Image: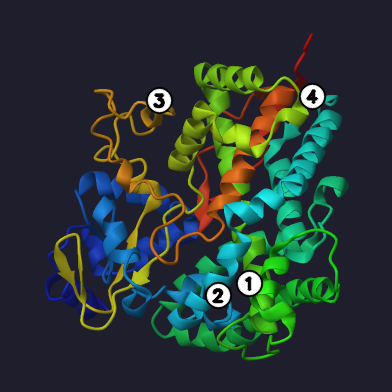
Amino acid sequence: YFLIGIYNVFFHPLRRYPGPLLWRFSPVPKNIHMLMGNYAAKALEIHKTYQGTVRVAPNELSYIQPQAWKDIMGRPLRSEMPKDLRYFGGENFGRDSIVTTRPADHTRQRRIFTHAFSNTALKAQEPLLASYADQMVEVMGRHDRRGRVNIVDLYNFCTFDIMADLTFGEPLLLLQKGAYIPWVHNLFAGLKFVIWGVVLLEIPLLGPLVQAVTAAPLKKKAQEHTDYAGRLVDRRLAEANHAKPDIWSFVLRRSGGGEGVDGDDGDTKGLSVREMHANAAVFMVAGTETTATVLSGTTFHLLRNPRVYGLLVREIRGRFARAEDIRVDGLVGLEYLQAVLMEGLRLYNPAGAGLPRIVPKGGAEICGNVVPEGTLVSVNPYVAFTHPDNWARPTEFVPERWLHPEDPEWKDDRRDVHEPFSYGPRNCLGKNLAWLELRLLLAKTLWHYDMELCPGMEEWVVQKSYITWEKGPLMVTLKPVERD
């Protein structure tokens, strides 16, 4: 092991890249911080010490430059840098979803789902989204009589109910029940379990043993997750005339109304049933907790910055006289709301430290340097979005940087490094839906209620990260807005 470390430091193809000695010697330091959940914060500290590209493990490079998005994530699918599937549950979750599928299948799936997540399709979903937003603020009204509410839970309940209705044709009823169901609890727990799996598999000798012991139960758990989603999808697909438009309304139309959808392997036109099941399971992870995370972090920063909070509530309440007037078209025109959400996505991006890609055969040029094949490379969103090389006053919540980029204070901000929904052909499919939910849920909340942080919440944002942030309760007080 010691000789391998000597090789890593002095003879490895990445030896010229800077980084802490022990991190270049062995993957153990990075893995320890990943297990502790503080790798994102540690990576920021390291990037402040070593400028530009940093070697964070013997075979891994971390980037914070705008060009890195293009070089790593922006390549055409036919020559893409593949994802490190260990961070997606490995082969246990199969290769059927749009997140893990191979390039040719990704193009087909993306083409089909793009219609379901287009602005035109989402416009048809506005009544559904508005109904859940109204249900959320109604639930808040019941909580305000008790004085304190965990806003993280309410945002989660709402986003899960919305996505379930879009994906399964029925909600999970989390808002109604005021509690998570076991399936959702397992989704949260699974993220930390994935990180443990990644780390343990790298331990010499122990890795193969871990793989042998855990492969079967992991695959079983993954299948249970997909099967649960699959049963709900099957129930939705069995409805010949579903009462309201949802994701499958568009998918089935693209798949010939379901007539030519193969139950196993699919065809070149539509989706197989297996692919539908896999993607439904993915949507219930990627399209729920992530949106609730941004709303939670943005709410925290708003309540820690009274000036910004005051400007935003004046914009929202000044634009809409009645709650029913709060509509998607009107929200798009609220410039300060947009700037607040952009700043929330910068300081509290759900992706945390990011997920690595693998340099393909023959190597690749990244930020002007050729990186050898097999190297793990990533843009670290948390570091890139808060590093002083990229931003003025990097840790401060200042929406004005997005409104007045020509201002001398913000003119050197590297706004092109800010890719909160990732970049390239595999960027976030649900970006349009996320923006719609972010604007609608935050605007509805602030139109109805005055909010304050409860005592003891000042350091809430200091959290562990396991793929996404491990959020504790964000306790706030709610007071209905008094209107004439």
Mark 1: amino acid: Asn
Q: Up-down: is 266 above or below 456?
A: below
The answer to whether the residue labelled 4 contacts the one labelled 3, judged by CB atoms less than 8 Å apart, is: no
> Which one is earlier in the sequence, the residue at label 2 or at label 3?
2
112 or 142: which is nearer to us?
A: 112
| Residue 148 visible in the snapshot | no
> Which one is earlier in the sequence, the residue at label 2 or at label 1?
2
Q: Which residue has dot 2 on it?
A: 109
Q: Which residue has dot 3 on it?
A: 400
Q: Which residue has dot 4 on it?
A: 147
The answer to whether the residue labelled 2 contacts the one labelled 3, judged by CB atoms less than 8 Å apart, is: no
> Which one is earlier in the sequence, the residue at label 2 or at label 4?
2
Q: Residues within 10 Å of mark 1 (few under 14, many from 20)?
A: many
Outermost residue, top direction?
484
Q: Up-down: is 43 above or below 362?
A: above
**Residue lying at 69% horizontally and 80% vertically, measured from the top left:** 256
Q: Which residue has dot 1 on it?
A: 279
Q: How many numbered marks have been drawn onto this rendered protein structure?
A: 4
Report x, y in % for residue 441.
Answer: 67, 38
Can you tell which of label 2 and label 1 is closer to the viewer? 2
Report helix, strand or loop for mark 4: loop
Report x, y in % for residue 115.
Answer: 59, 64
Q: CA distance from mark 2 to mark 3?
A: 38 Å
408 or 390: which is nearer to us?
A: 408
Mark 2: amino acid: Gln
Q: CA distance from mark 4 to mark 1?
A: 39 Å
**Residue lying at 51% horizontally and 66% vertically, measured from the top left:** 195
Mark 4: amino acid: Gly
Report helix, strand or loop for mark 3: helix
> Which one is earlier in the sequence, the residue at label 4 or at label 3?
4
